[in-house]
Amino acid sequence: MPANKPMRRQRGAVLLILLAVLALAGASLLMSAFSGGAVDKRRVQRTQMLLADATDALTGFAAANGRLPRPAVSATDGRERPQPCASDEQCTGFLPWVALGVAGEDAWGKLLRYSVTPAFTSYDYQPATAAATRTVQQRGADGELHYVAGGPACTAQLRCAALVLLSHGKHNYGVSAHGVEQANASTGADGGDEAVNATTSTHFITRAASSKPDAPGGEFDDQLAWLSLQTLYARMRAARTLPN
C-alpha cells in the first residue's frame, strides 16, 4: 500500500492541474462573452429587433386606424401628440411608444427618433395622389451617397418612404429615456452624417458603422429603418382601411 501513495499523489496533482486549466478556460470564455465588443454587438442586434418591432407596430396602427400616428408628446410622454402636424418638422420627434405598445428606446437607453409624412397622420389624403416625403441615402465604400428610399424629388409617381425610424447608437446625439439630450462627442468638424440625421426631418443617411472621424461622413453608428409607401398601402388595403 505505501508504494502506491506516490502514484495517487501524482494523479491527484494532475487532476488539480486539469481543474485549474478548465477554470482558467471558463474564466477566459466569460471574459470574452462580457467584453465591450461582444456587449456592443448584442446591443446592435437588439436595436435592430426593436426597430423592426416598432416598424411592424406602426404598420399595424395604420391598418387598424387608417392612418399613421403622430410623434410622441415629449421625451417623457409616449402618448401620441394630439395636435395635427402642420409641417415636416412638427411630424418629426420621438416614437409614440405608449400609443403603439412597444419599447420606445434603443439598447443604449436612447429614445427612438420618428419622422413621418404629415399627410399620412390624418384621414385627409388620397392614395393615388399623396406623396410620401421621407428619403434615405446610403453612403457607399466610395464615399458617395445613393438613394435606397425615394429620390431627389418625392411625388406620387416617385414614391419615397412614408416614415423613418432612427437609433442614434452608442455614441453622439440622441435623447435619453429621462429626457436628457446627449452631446455630440465626435472629433469631426461638423458631426458629419450623424449630425444630418440628428437635425433633418426629411432626408436621412445610412451606412456602415465607423469610429474614424476622417471617414467619409465622419464617425457613424446610427441605425435606421423605414417603411415604403407600397408596404403601407398593401397592409392598409388588406385591412380595408386605405382611403378610397
Image (cartoon, rainbow, N blue to C red):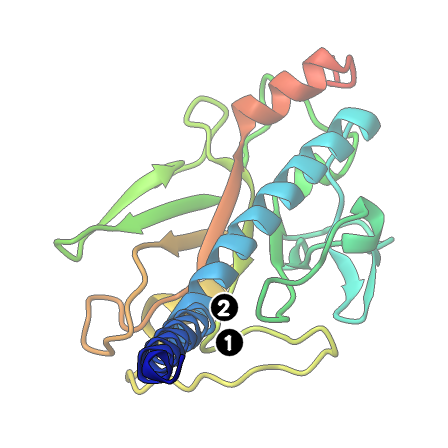
Total number of numbered discs in the rendering: 2
Relative to residue 63, is residue 220 drawn left or right?
left
x and y, in percent, of residue 22 in the image: 39, 71
Q: Answer with mark 2 or mark 1, whichever residue precedes in sequence.
A: 1
**Which mark is on residue 101?**
none
Query: Foreground: 219 or 162?
Result: 219
| Residue appearing at x 35%, y 66% in the figure | 193
Q: Amino acid at mark 1?
A: Tyr
Residue 133 at least partly seen:
no
x and y, in percent, of residue 132 in the image: 54, 35
**For numbered disc 1, what is the local secondary structure?**
loop
| Residue appearing at x 80%, y 49% in the figure | 84
x and y, in percent, of residue 14 in the image: 32, 77
Residue 63 lies, with reference to residue 194, above or below; the image says above
Residue 174 lies, with reference to residue 160, above or below; the image says below
Relative to residue 110, is residue 73 drawn left or right?
right
- The residue that mark 1 highlights is 173
Q: Amino acid at mark 2?
A: Ala
| Residue appearing at x 37%, y 83% in the figure | 5
**For numbered disc 2, what is the local secondary structure?**
helix
Mark 1 packing: few (<14 Cα in 10 Å), some, or many (20+)? many
Q: Quadrant of residue 163?
A: top right
Residues at circles 2 and 1 in contact by the CB criterion of under 8 Å = yes
In the picture as drawn, the residue positioned furthest to the front comes out as: 1
**Which mark is on residue 198?**
2
